Image (spheres, rainbow, N blue to C red):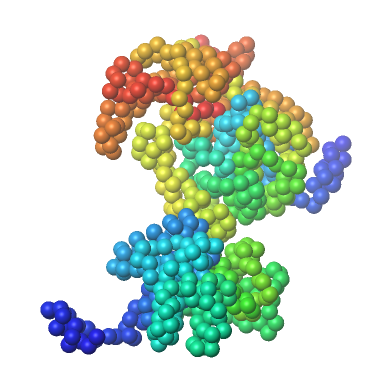
Amino acid sequence: MDKLREQIRRIEAGGRVSCGFLPFGVPEIDDRLPGGGLALGALHEVAGGANGALDGAAAALFAAGILARTHGQILWCLSRRDLFAPAMALAGLHPDRVIYAEGGSEKVILACFEEGLRHGGLAGVVAEVAKLPMTPSRRLQLAAESTGTIGIAIRRWRRQTEAADFGQPTASTTRWRVTALPSSPLPVPGVGRPRWLVELIRARAGECADFEVEACDEEGRVAIPAKLVHRPAEAVDGRERAIA
Amino acid sequence: MPATKAQALIAGLVMHEADPEADSDALEKLAVWMQRHYSPLVSVHNPDGMILDLTGVAHLFGGEAAMLKEMVRKLVAVGCGARIAIAPTYGAAYALSHCVASPTFVLEGKVSEALDLLPVTALRLPVEMVAGLKKMGFERIGELNTTPRAPLALRFGPPVGLRLDQAYGRVSEPFDPIIPPETPHVRRNFAEPIGAAETIARYVGVLVEQLAATLEVKGLGARKLDLVCFRVDNHIQAVRAGTSRAVRDVKRLTKLLTDKIETIDPGFGIETMTLTALITEPLVYRASTSVLGEAEVKDVSGLIDTLSNRIGESQLYRLAPVESDIPERAIRRITPLSPATGASWPPHWPRPSRLLDPPEHIETVALLPDHPPAAFTWRGLRRRVARADGPERVFGEWWKSDAERNAVRDYFQVEDDAGERYWLFRAGDGEDHKTGSQRWFMHGVFA
């Protein structure tokens, strides 16, 4: 059976070499992704849910968290000037690593995106786009495959009605939607660690899934919140030690 | 006027020998400077002028009018009084610059309006011809323009008609751009004019190869390249490409130039192409060291060059922290290849991933002085605040302006029922009206 799977994988790859995978470090998510993580050398799409479709705040931070765990320079293609770099630094993406490119139009941004993916010297490329038709997305996917650079398209629209565009098929390997959820409860008044509903809407050779996660920490890692019934592992350890 | 007469008129007149050669040298030097700063096509017009072809250049300076202002400012700064005019034809620009004192910019289609009132001396005609025209009663260019040509040509020969047509843009004018001495320069003439994009690209490759060989002998790398195509109909098309570091790599330079091929209009064909490395810097071979355990730093300067030639240098940047508590002042742009600063923003302070600039005014229900709002209305939607954190008080930077001496902002991080997190602030401390208007603003969206 395993041999057959291997054979099928080889046929599907069509001579392309896999560039490796970037695990989230969270078994619940990594188990659902073919290869055990986000494929490097591939195009991934991230959009925000609800109001996030317009501001793309959570989507940008989710992308920053992924890229914070890579090594090397990042190219970030912007369509609007509202990205706030200190927040990216809080998610582990050091300002020295990020080169910003401001494109006037979607076409220019896609061209910069592709140029960045084809170059091969970058760790990752992010572009904020509204429309991503099939042909450009295939070009981007091929460009990413040729160099092993991870490409993340943050889908961001001007109007809520345009967000239906996210249903259109593209050549991207995975597709995510990140929606803000009420933050982790604290024993005192205040805002706890932010939580997101992360939906894996599409994964090539994989299945859809959704996860409720705690937002990126200072190293860009997301975490699955500890359920009250199970108790966080550390707390259990601590108590046992206290008893012993 | 004889010198003695001038001395009799003005007491203590200081006299210098005319030195046309030195003047011409100085003019050439200025032309080279103009070429570096403004346009690849500069031609010296002896004894006292120069012509710049600004086709496709002005937008880099924010339009012709802004460019004109900038040029005058720069020239005054280096101690040159200059009279400048920008016009669709060389003839018109010459006439305007010699007869209108203030810097002038004339649009396409407004040429005749601007020219008609100028005196005939502005037409670049020999002195005796101008005198002859004046004797016949012609004072202004407009009068000359409406006169039948045949008698004029009979009396003065073809120059009058030619200069008129050149000024009004009815015939084109040859342009002889300067090539600054000692800059690496290669040239290729074609037996048959070329026009296809592929052919142009191929010869760009050939020229770059030759230029790279020249540069290698001198140990230089190119920072700025000018590709000039001379068309069969005497028009000149120029392409300029810049690099962020000295480069001699044939492939990379060829790519930078061929990326811009679509901006070249070959017309009826190109008969000569020249390639000049306008700005060069020493480039020496460096031994690549391999240090065990150190991550290899990949060179992205090639990508930076490609992108900055496509979208413009100012659109490509990195951000570096500034020590300021005011969020919009906490970042500054640096060039993408500047050395790593190693600095980051202070951790532990929550900062939104999208910052609204300028902050948007919101309607709130809040207890003063130091409670977060209980509800707020932003962009027409009312949101109830479920949780909040704050305030984080930010004081105005009194050393920057007097208006900020007492200014205070209180920032709150709030979360609404749906779980969306926002960054709000109140202008003022909630008690004292000196500290601000006490109005509330939305400043950012958290993830």
Q: Tell how many labels.
A: 0
Up/down of A66 relative to A99, above or below: above
- The residue lying at 81 percent from left, 50 percent from top is A14
| Residue B159 seen anywhere in this rendered image of the structure | yes
| Towards the viewer: B153 or B395 | B153
Place of residue A121 in the rendered image (x, y in percent of width and height, measured from the top left): 59, 53
Which residue is at the front of the view, A136 or A207? Answer: A136
Q: In this view of the protein, can residue B292 be seen by the observer?
A: no
Q: Is residue A2 left or right of residue A27?
A: right
Q: Quadrant of residue B433?
A: top left
Point out the image quarter for the N terminus of chain A: top right
Where on the picture, by quarter, is residue B95?
A: bottom left
Q: Identify the residue shown where x is 51% and y is 67%.
A: B112
Q: Is residue B151 above or below residue B358?
A: below
Extreme-left residue of the structure: B11
Residue in the picture at 72% in, 50% down: A139
- B436 w.r.t. B216: above or below: above
Q: Nearer the viewer, residue A100 or A198?
A: A100
Q: Residue at x 35, y 36 (%)?
A: B324
* Image position of B74 (left or right of A140): left
Residue A13 vertical placement versus A62 (above, below): below
**Relative depth, front residue between B334 and B134:** B134
Residue lying furthest front in this view? B137
Residue B205 drawn at (x, y percent):
64, 72
Spot occupied by residue A110 in the image (x, y as percentages of width and height) = 65, 48
A9 sits to left or right of A51: right
Q: Position of residue B184 (x, y in %)?
A: 50, 77
